[in-house]
Image (cartoon, helix red, strand yellow):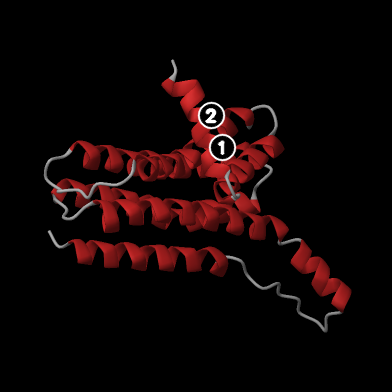
Amino acid sequence: MNKQRLEALAEGIFAIVMTLLVIEIKVPEIHHTVTNAELGEAVRQLTPLFLSYMLSFTVLATLWRAHVFMISYYAKKIDTHIVNFNIIFFIFVALLPFSAHLLGEYHYTQFAIIFYGINISLLSLILYGLRTYMRLSHNIDEDKFYTSDRKYTRIRILLPLLSTLLAIPLSFWNTNISLVMYTFVVLFNFFPGGITFIERIYQKIIIRK
């Protein structure tokens, strides 16, 4: 298997999907001479779509960073199982523009929140499955990295999953809280010191059990 071709496919898919996220946001069509106030109000009504776009772009960026680490730096070579994991992963990456647009248009509905959450959950679970296979496999001749690098990759993969595991059940109570969970947990990955903070919690809660 040619690792460079898989890397090229991954870069192309991520680039296209990230672009499609914003293409789904249409410029308001007003069929008369529009005033500044009218145009501003029309754009303001697109706020949920813009927020969904930014959230989804951040999710993809988080998963892309983890994917690059595993495929481009961790594995010296790949096998058929890694390719199959990636194909399934790309299926749900390509689905994200639809899920994001659905969430932006119908953010007040439980269905849109759950659909979006399932999409993100599947992405995280598949990528975590890929990481687990690569860690246990004897076929990829992996590079050795510091323990902290592997921990950061695990956290970046599991953070989106954590947000959905909290947001989906919360949607039965209040959809706005679910939206806050999606946003806060994913964006926390980009806050200075956010990964280190979560790692400390992980060590206290999980490792010490």
Q: Which mark is residue 201?
A: 2
Q: Is residue 181 left or right of residue 209?
A: right
Work out whether residue 109 can be spotted.
no
- Give the x, y percent position of residue 71: 27, 55
| Residue name at image x 82 percent, y 66 percent | 41
Badge 1 vs badge 2, beta-carbon distance below 8 Å: yes
- Give the x, y percent position of residue 53: 59, 59
Return the residue nearer the eye: 26 or 92: 92
| Residue name at image x 57 percent, y 45 percent | 193
**Is residue 109 positioned above or below 76 on the image?**
above
Farthest bottom residue in view: 33
| Residue name at image x 41 percent, y 55 percent | 65
Return the residue nearer the eye: 158 or 118: 158
- SS label for mark 2: helix
- SS label for mark 1: helix
**Which quarter of the rendering shows the N terminus?**
bottom left
**Which quarter of the rendering shows the C terminus?**
top left
Q: Is residue 35 left or right of residue 6?
A: right
Amino acid on which the number 2 mark rests in the picture:
Ile
Q: Which mark is residue 143?
A: none
Return the residue nearer the eye: 151 or 14: 151
Q: Name the residue beneath numbered marker 1.
A: 197
| Residue name at image x 20 percent, y 36 percent | 136
Amino acid on which the number 1 mark rests in the picture:
Phe
Work out whether residue 97 can be spotted.
yes
**Is residue 20 positioned above or below 125 on the image?**
below
> Cα distance, mark 1 to mark 2?
7 Å
